[in-house]
Image (cartoon, helix red, strand yellow):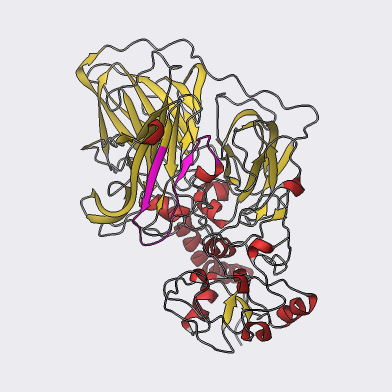
Amino acid sequence: MSDPPTRRAFLKWTAIGAAAILLPLGIGSGYLWARASRGNVGRVDFASPLRIPPIAPVSSGAEKRRVLDLAIQEGRSRFRSEGLARTWGVNQAYLGPTIRVRRGETIAPRVRNLLPEPTSLHWHGMELPAASDGGPHQRIEPGEVWEPVWRIEQPAATLWYHPHLHGTTKEHVYRGVAGLLLIDDDTSPGLHDEYGVDDIPVIIQDKKFTGDGDLDPSGISFGGLDVVGMLGDEILINGTWGPILRVRRKLTRLRVLNASNGRVYRLTFDDRREFHVVGTDVGLLPRPFATDEIQLSPGERAELVVRMRPAERIRLCSEPPELTGNFLYEHFAGGDDRFELLQLEGDPELEPSSPLPAAFPTTPPVAAPAPARAPREFVLGEVTINSQTIDMHRTDVVVETGSTEEWSVHNAADTPHNFHVHNARFDIIDIDAQPPKITGPKDTVYVAPGARVRLRVHFGQYPDPHTPYMYHCHVLAHEDAGVMGQFVIVDPGTTAPDVAITPHTHQEDHDQSMVAPRHPRRHPARRRRPVLEAGAVHRGLPDRCPLPAAAVVDPDPDQTRRRRRTRPRDMAPAAGRTHQRRARGVLPRCDQHAHPRPGLRAKPLRQCHRNAGAEHCGADLRDRPDAVIPREHAHEASRRDLRSSNVDNNVRSPTSRS
């Protein structure tokens, strides 16, 4: 008989067994940890002159309007030597021109969508009517031209523009649709403003590239280890890889925009020299603020003035940002990454610059709200605000025109977020009861995990109870995942029952349903006179899809019960399942006007509903008992109703609704 195992042998084989189990786990974890570590320090050959986006040409229109022709288009761009990348831009292959306007002007952009899919163009930081805001409700179909008009009534600032179509913002911005929008006025005398000489745009974006030089979109969505979506390992400045800025004057103004999808930058120079911050998101500071670093989350801007010496060479860098969250989330959100961004090289002889002013005439700070106005609370979850994802048919907040409110934004998740409000400017009161380091007019603020940020928000002067503005996280993967809400601005004294609803397109319904499915009770035809109030639901008929009178069904309880009985089990609007069902031929569709959102089982109408009452699109829907009609079409009554004639006692025109 063999001797019994000794204690030493037992421990030996136990250790071997444990190693066999834990070693693969350790190797896998180490690989994922290392894979999430990105940076370009020491890898970039700074040899390309920094591209300066051209100034957009402006023509004179009727009523002294300043007309801008902007075409959102596809293109090809060479960023590195590997090959061409498929990109999008405005009036060019990548990015867009810098729009420069003055306070008091009326501008009228003509935005043409030359892309193969719908998009929008939002004027980030601009105070303007909701119908001109360019948010998710101002959808531009392929081939269409959108023509907003507004008068600029805000002080000098560095703004920007980018797409804002819900569900696809991250892809469209990543492809390159973005540009600066500069407002000039007479309140910034002495600041350096010769564009391209001592007034330099610095649009920072991080990218990933494939082996053949194309843009790599992998990891662009929120989920898994991609806690903020896209995090690239290469940096483009104004679309330039390895950029060099030739500095001609002693003082240079850098208008820095973080146009990345999800990365936070902590900007500093490699020699830790001091520079001055003279402006934040929507205006100038009261006086220059001296510092050696500044942190910008996606969508934030800052105007920096740096002093150079002749023949000097320095680099603008990004140190690991202070995300102040769970160390695992912080690492996978880019909290350990270092980058070299831009090399500045001074001429052998620098031209003199005017001295930096000691103070600027600026807009007064936002006044405190009335004592009777209670603060509003916003709690950010992983993909929610106040436990809700965006519903394009729901209005979450109603505010009065020109009012001031205190908003308290608390990040209750481990995920880094930030917070942006349309048609508003705010001052940061405090961050976790501590005053901010830099006080300036803002429209976007970083909200660290666990942090609470109190804002004093001033809203614009454009009441429109029919069209909402947005507030949301500007980490684009979070925004597209549903971290967004809606508010409308109304005249003082307006009560909720007096407010009407502006309808939205069917495709918008589909876009938002891919993330935030609505309960079947939220149906366009369930309320005869919708009202708008905090928590109310938009239930109007689609303005882009005019329906005939026969398509508006005034439901009765029997029909409602029949609809619920025939509701399919697989009705959840998950993108994959919707496309699978369409592939099986279950969804009836018009080749030109397909609306793939699942709905209630019923027999289809005999023609494309979108052109009903006008011209037919020539793609009649097949008469199939197993067909599925998208439930937002507002004409999915029982099979008996759909088989009946177009004249029915339960049918009446939208214009006759009481």
Give how far across and how far down residue 225 sits, in percent. 52, 57
Give how far across and how far down residue 480 sits, in percent. 53, 55
Judge whether residue 261 can be spotted in this image.
Answer: yes
Give how far across and how far down residue 189 sits, in percent. 41, 14
60 or 632, which lies in front? Answer: 60
Q: How many labels does the image show?
A: 0
Indicate whether residue 119 is drawn in magenta.
yes
Position above or below: 238 against 212:
above
Indicate left or right for 260 with 652 as reference: left
Position above or below: 511 against 371:
below
Q: In which quarter of the image is residue 364?
A: top right
Magenta region, residue range: 108-129
Q: Quadrant of the C terminus?
A: bottom right
Indicate whether residue 5 is drawn in magenta.
no
Q: Which residue is at 64% across, 76% downward?
A: 636
Position above or below: 64 against 642:
above
Residue lying farthest to the left in this orientation: 348
Q: Which residue is at 25% across, 59% downward?
A: 212
Judge whether residue 6 can be spotted in this image.
Answer: no
Position above or below: 274 against 462:
above
Give how far across and how far down residue 454 sits, in percent. 67, 33
523 or 497, which lies in front? Answer: 497
87 or 415, which lies in front? Answer: 87
Indicate left or right for 77 with 282 as reference: left
Indicate left or right for 597 with 552 as reference: left
Q: Quadrant of the N terminus?
A: bottom right
